[in-house]
Structure formats: C-alpha cells, structure tokens
Image (spheres, rainbow, N blue to C red):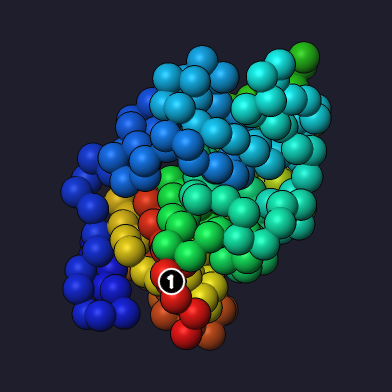
Amino acid sequence: MTTTSPTGEDTIAAPGLAMSEAEVFADFLSRVNLSGAVVAEIGGAFPIDLLHRQGVAKWYSIDPHRAAETSQDGIREVITARAEEMPLADASVDAVFSCNAFQFLDVAATLVQAHRVLRPGGLLYAHFGPIWSAVDGHQLEYVRYQDRDLTFWDDTLLPPWAHLAYDREELRALLRSGLTEELADLLVAHVHDDDTINRSFFEDYVAAALASGLEWVQLSATDQLDYQIAPPEYDAGLLRTVDPAQLAREVSHRRGVSTQLGVRDVLMVLRKACTAK
C-alpha cells in the first residue's frame, strides 16, 4: 500500500508503523524540543512526571471526556472541551500532539483549530487508528454489555469489514445467528448509529490535511493488523466472503471518489509556516 504526497513523493511507512503510546511519544520527542515548550494534547493526559522530565513549560490536555483539573505546579491543565472548539489563544502553542484520538473527532475542524493555536513553525503530530477504511474500522469501543466494556481487540464479535459489507438488517440477522438478540442489537446500533467515531476514510484525512493551511511534513499509513479477528460461528448462509478490492470499488462508487481500503494506522505530521503566505 502506498500513498503519495502533494510533491509526488511516496509517504507510506514500513509495516511496523503501529506503535505503543510510549513509542509514539518518543517519536514526537525526536521531532520537537519540549524544553520550555507549550503543548496542546488532543485526547488524553500524559503523566505529569513525564512532562517534568522533558522540561515542558505548559501542557494543555484537551479532552471532553476528562474532568477539568490543573496539576499543583500548574504545568498540566486538563480542559474539558472538544478539539474542534479548542479554547486556547491564537499562536499560543509550540506543538499539538495526539495519540489515538483523531478517529473520534471532526478532523477538518480540528486542523483549523490547530492551525490557529500553533505558533509559526509549530508542529502538529497525530498518530491514530483504526479508521473507517480498516478491516476493523467499526472501532468496537464504548459498548457495555453485562457490566463489562467491550474492546475490539479482545471481543472480536464482528466479522471482517462488518461496517462496510453489510447493511443494518443484514448485519442484525447475521449477528443474531450467533449472539443474543440484545448483544447483536447493541453492536448493530454501534456500527450504524454511534457518534463516537467519525466514519472518515483515509482519503478524508488526506483532504483535511491538504485544506488545513498547514504544511505537509509526513503522512504515513499501514494496513498491519496486530491481533487476530476470530468472530463466533455465524450462519454460513448469512456470512459473506469479502473481497477487499471489490468492496473498495463499491465504496468508491457510493462515495463518488476513489477510496482505498485496508488503511489501519496513520501518522500525520504537519507544520505551520514560519511566515504568513
């Protein structure tokens, strides 16, 4: 799988792009000097001791699902807000950082905010996935069943490409053939109705990056899957063998734009121009 930058250079990463949170932060550190820096983190709140070790001046954690708080020394401030409505001043941060959050937000609106709050020369670094283009793009999270939160990597209840290859009633019939009606209906509602995921394809992220006003540094992707999808035994008559290439053609036709499938993890690095254009 290969993507191409606006300059015509290939930007695809090696198959090992998928990284742990610690590896993502280490890669971020290799690109940004955090000593005395002001950073806006989108989704999450890095440990204060880690920020101390890097000499961070101020670290804003923008996350609508976290309670607002400020560390005793005032270095880390959690702001309960959406990234699309970042409550920070213009040109006030040296970097915007995000790990595993961009699939949950409006990317175009978030990048507009990032462009606004970044100082000239400031860097946006975002690592995220899986996204709607992926074999497991349904992102089975935020589903609770029998007093337990389900996760897509442990609870592989949905077959590959379930979010794109089946309509609502087809998926309901399939899942009810191997699960309780209650759980099947929960999963169908999550795939088709839940608003925690943005349902953006890889091409949508590329388009948002190009329209953001930020300069393209790197946009890399991989189709590597780091766990096994092993769904329950469903009715064979209802289960489809999906050809990803054919599915991509169907999705492209529905969307009216060429769409590749399989992209699962993405690294997006953009920079605000040092001088106004």
Q: Is residue 270 visible?
A: yes
Task: Give the number of marks.
Answer: 1
* Quadrant of the image occupied by residue 24: top left
Secondary structure of the residue carrying numbered label 1: loop
Residue type, mark 1 in image: Ala
Q: Position of residue 222 (x, y in %)?
A: 30, 51
Near mark 1 (Cα within 10 A), the count class, few <14, some 14-19 or many ≥20, is some
95 vs 244, left or right, is right
236 vs 23, left or right, is right
* Quadrant of the image occupied by residue 181: top right
The residue sitting at 32% across, 46% down in the picture is 31
Name the residue beneath numbered marker 1.
273
Q: Nearer the viewer, residue 48 or 17?
A: 48
Q: Position of residue 186 (x, y in %)?
A: 76, 37
Quadrant (top left, top right, bottom left, bottom right) of the N terminus: bottom left
Q: Position of residue 84 (x, y in %)?
A: 71, 58
Q: Is residue 186 above or below residue 265?
A: above
* Residue furthest front in the image: 36
10 vs 220, left or right, is left
Q: Position of residue 74 (x, y in %)?
A: 69, 25
The residue sitting at 28% across, 68% down in the picture is 3
The residue sitting at 48% across, 65% down in the picture is 120
Q: Nearer the viewer, residue 46 or 23?
A: 46
Q: Is residue 56 above or below residue 85?
A: above
The residue sitting at 24% across, 64% down in the picture is 11
Q: Is residue 113 visible?
A: no
